[in-house]
Image (spheres, coloured by chain):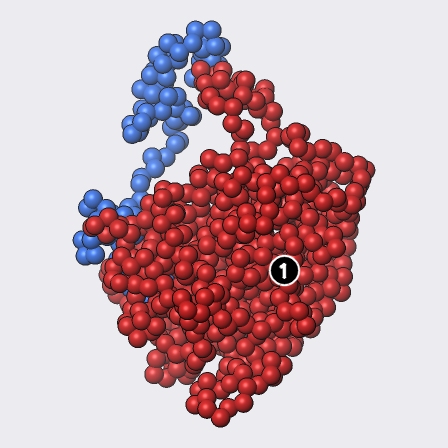
Chain colours: A blue, B red
């Protein structure tokens, strides 16, 4: 709750004080909530992380990425991951047929 | 900076102008979404005083923003036409996004290839019901279309040399069927349709197309047999919009939702087919619906044949491996139509599984889990997400599922909608065009080959744009339209909005879907179809007794679903009546009581000495169906197949033969 009121008062200040305050403030927010380091850091974390927010484990994709995205058997670059989709005569991915 | 933007977004609402966002839009280019009260639109009172009607004038209107619609829309904008794209969904949410297969094109990157061989494969795949001039056009333009897509930025997968990688798929062969398997299918990893749609949408933003997103097209504005525009309902605020234009392109997609089990989105409701039907024009070949034998019950995703290839078996409620009775040698590996029919017969005879006894089981838990994980990675995830079963312990509920509609609005190879009379032959309907799954050009004929439908979208979307560019010039003056044009559509809307019968929309819809699934699915005989026609007629009559609940006009999804139900019903009655009349088996339409194809000559025997049957006595012809919307009565006429290609010297037409793979 205190974080929210801090946000509210901070936003009023932001309008007058501009970018400088904002960057310092968001830096504070990011370290406080322990947000995950992204490829490009968020300017401002969208919601404050609470105690009950579950740590979302990334589920392992059953289809593995090829090294450098090149299929070693067919030398196809940028092709579908995993076994050849057309090996059964239809276009199959993860057990689902999408075209036949 | 962020707070300033938030404040301006909150205050400005829909009225966004260049002044509010100084840093972002440097140019004076119009923003791509429509702003209420654009300078070419005016409010009119001519039609109704209760519903605000806004009139717009454009050079061309495209209904539908899937693959074909977007390609047509920006093709027209590129040529300088003032184009509107009216769509009930945001463009990147159209069902094209779900097409994960590839696109066929005879680029010749893997081995020497010729588009004439692709032409032969497609004609054969269509069981000689496809119009060979349209197929010639599509296969000849295929390499140009794919290269054009690639130039737009679509990230196809590549070979080591950097050329587009092509794989073997979809019944493609070399040297007119004699040279072995051809490698023609280009793809973008495993999301070709998604990538196509996003590429086309991104490309279309370069041009000045006006997008009217979440506008539900109600009807065509027809006057004297000419199409003068479209009338649509803005779902966001309930206003009616009339889009007047000299050229209307329909690209609304298929109508999978008439069946209980289909792979299509909930929005695939055949709106374009229904609009054309209500305008009094015919739809073509609606009885040809492509099924897949094993779609997950309830979800509609298809389970690959590889499951059966790896040892999965189909069982009925008695736990019996019923495929042994229908195909003693091939058993579960029989061809798709045999498997579909077998499952349907088991369900009809009362041995279906589940509380309603309406599906079969695909059992995989007798296979070692390691084998499943290595040979079919991801299937346990799919089964858990879509069927809620653990594939190593329980069987997956499956039943035959609709995947594609070969039929639709009849067009010629240029994308112009046609009608047919025996005296005059094919006649173009001025001002109306169609492309994509909604149209029937007809390149897929009686059966669609894999990876050909994405090609169909881009080639005919472009063809519509080229034809309109040839016929018209941008900025032409529009012919006058009656001030009360479209009032029947508004009257219908009003009637549905205040409908107070006894049966809900969802109940009527489920009745229709179950009737179609039981009677007009894979297993078709005269008796079953006749019974289905009578039941469908009864369900159609219950539309008069419909009850809706939401009386508002702003974002009334109850009303929109009811309008979609009306459209679905028109498609459904035409499908089942056309199927009942067609007494032969051809491609996707196979009947137990008429198992052979009936052509003008018997191609199974030597042709010398045979007499050609007149068109009334054979079935190698297109069905043209019309419906009287008030009674639901279907009238059928027929139209001959076009057997000549566009240029006989360049590409000889393929004479019919027995189709065997």
- Nearest the eye: B101 or A57: B101
**Residue B534 appears in the rendering:** yes
The image quadrant of residue B624 is bottom right
Q: Whole-percent x and y of residue A34?
A: 31, 24
**Residue B508 appears in the rendering:** no
From the viewer's perspective, is B488 left or right of B607? right
Label 1 crowd bin: few (<14), some (14–19), many (20+), radius 10 Å: some
What residue occupies the far front of the structure in this picture?
Answer: B649
From the viewer's perspective, is B404 left or right of B38? left
Q: Whole-percent x and y of residue B647?
A: 45, 66
What residue occupies the far top of the structure in this picture?
Answer: A16
The image quadrant of residue B16 is top right
Q: Residue at x 34, y 72 (%)?
A: B176
A70 relative to B78, above or below? below
- Nearest the eye: A69 or B349: A69
Q: Residue at x 53, y 70 (%)?
A: B642
- Nearest the eye: B530 or B647: B647
Q: Label 1 is found on which chain of the structure?
A: B
């Amino acid at each position: 709750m205190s974080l929210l009121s801090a946000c509210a008062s901070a936003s009023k200040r932001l309008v007058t004080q501009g970018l400088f305050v904002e960057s310092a403030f968001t830096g504070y927010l990011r370290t406080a909530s322990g947000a995950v380091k992204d490829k490009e850091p968020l300017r401002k974390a969208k919601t404050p992380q609470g105690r009950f927010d579950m740590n979302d484990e990334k589920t392992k994709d059953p289809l593995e990425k090829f090294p450098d995205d090149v299929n070693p058997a067919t030398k196809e670059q940028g092709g579908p991951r995993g076994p050849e989709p057309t090996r059964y005569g239809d276009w199959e991915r993860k057990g689902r047929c999408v075209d036949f | 900076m962020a707070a300033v933007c938030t404040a301006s977004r909150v205050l400005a609402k829909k009225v966004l102008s260049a002044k509010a966002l100084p840093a972002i839009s440097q140019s004076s280019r119009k923003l791509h979404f429509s702003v209420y009260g654009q300078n070419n639109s005016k409010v009119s009172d001519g039609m109704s005083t209760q519903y605000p009607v806004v009139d717009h004038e454009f050079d061309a209107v495209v209904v539908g923003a899937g693959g074909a619609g977007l390609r047509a829309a920006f093709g027209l904008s590129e040529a300088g036409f003032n184009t509107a794209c009216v769509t009930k969904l945001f463009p990147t949410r159209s069902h094209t996004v779900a097409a994960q297969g590839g696109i066929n094109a005879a680029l010749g990157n893997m081995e020497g290839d010729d588009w004439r061989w692709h032409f032969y494969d497609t004609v054969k795949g269509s069981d000689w019901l496809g119009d060979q001039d349209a197929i010639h056009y599509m296969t000849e333009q295929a390499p140009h279309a794919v290269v054009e897509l690639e130039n737009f930025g679509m990230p196809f997968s590549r070979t080591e040399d950097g050329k587009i990688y092509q794989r073997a798929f979809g019944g493609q062969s070399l040297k007119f069927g004699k040279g072995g398997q051809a490698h023609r299918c280009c793809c973008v990893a495993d999301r070709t349709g998604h990538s196509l749609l996003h590429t086309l949408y991104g490309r279309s933003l370069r041009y000045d197309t006006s997008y009217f997103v979440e506008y539900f097209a109600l009807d065509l504005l027809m006057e004297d047999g000419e199409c003068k525009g479209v009338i649509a309902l803005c779902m966001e605020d309930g206003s009616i919009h009339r889009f007047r234009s000299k050229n209307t392109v329909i690209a609304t997609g298929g109508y999978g939702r008439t069946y209980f089990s289909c792979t299509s989105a909930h929005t695939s409701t055949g709106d374009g087919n229904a609009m054309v039907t209500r305008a009094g024009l015919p739809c073509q070949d609606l009885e040809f619906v492509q099924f897949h034998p094993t779609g997950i019950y309830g979800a509609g995703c298809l389970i690959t044949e590889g499951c059966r290839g790896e040892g999965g078996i189909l069982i009925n409620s008695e736990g019996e491996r019923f495929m042994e009775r229908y195909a003693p040698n091939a058993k579960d590996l029989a061809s798709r139509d045999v498997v579909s029919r077998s499952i349907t017969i088991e369900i009809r005879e009362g041995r279906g599984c589940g509380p309603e006894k309406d599906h079969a089981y695909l059992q995989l838990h007798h296979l070692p889990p390691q084998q499943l994980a290595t040979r079919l990675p991801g299937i346990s995830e799919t089964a858990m997400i879509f069927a809620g079963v653990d594939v190593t312990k329980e069987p997956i509920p499956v039943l035959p599922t609709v995947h594609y509609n070969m039929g639709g609005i009849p067009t010629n190879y240029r994308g112009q909608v046609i009608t047919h009379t025996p005296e005059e032959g094919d006649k173009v309907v001025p001002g109306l065009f169609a492309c994509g799954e909604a149209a029937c050009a007809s390149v897929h004929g009686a059966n669609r080959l894999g990876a050909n439908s994405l090609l169909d979208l881009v080639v005919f979307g472009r063809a519509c744009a080229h034809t309109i560019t040839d016929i018209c010039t941008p900025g032409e003056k529009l012919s006058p339209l009656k001030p009360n044009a479209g009032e029947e559509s508004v009257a219908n809307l009003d009637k549905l909005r205040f409908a107070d019968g006894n049966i809900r929309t969802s109940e009527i819809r489920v009745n229709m879907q179950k009737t179609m699934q039981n009677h007009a699915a894979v297993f078709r005989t005269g008796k079953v179809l006749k019974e289905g026609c009578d039941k469908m007629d009864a369900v159609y009559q219950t539309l008069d007794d419909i009850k809706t609940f939401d009386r508002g006009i702003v974002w009334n999804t109850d009303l929109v679903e009811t309008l979609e139900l009306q459209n679905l019903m028109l498609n459904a009655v035409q499908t089942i009546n056309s199927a009942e009349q067609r007494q032969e088996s051809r491609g996707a339409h196979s009947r137990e009581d008429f198992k052979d194809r009936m052509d003008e000559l018997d191609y199974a025997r030597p042709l010398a000495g045979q007499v050609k049957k007149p068109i009334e006595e054979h079935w190698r012809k297109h069905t043209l169906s019309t419906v009287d919307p008030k009674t639901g009565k279907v009238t059928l006429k027929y139209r001959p197949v076009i057997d000549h290609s566009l240029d006989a010297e360049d590409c000889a037409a393929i004479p019919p033969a027995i189709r065997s793979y």
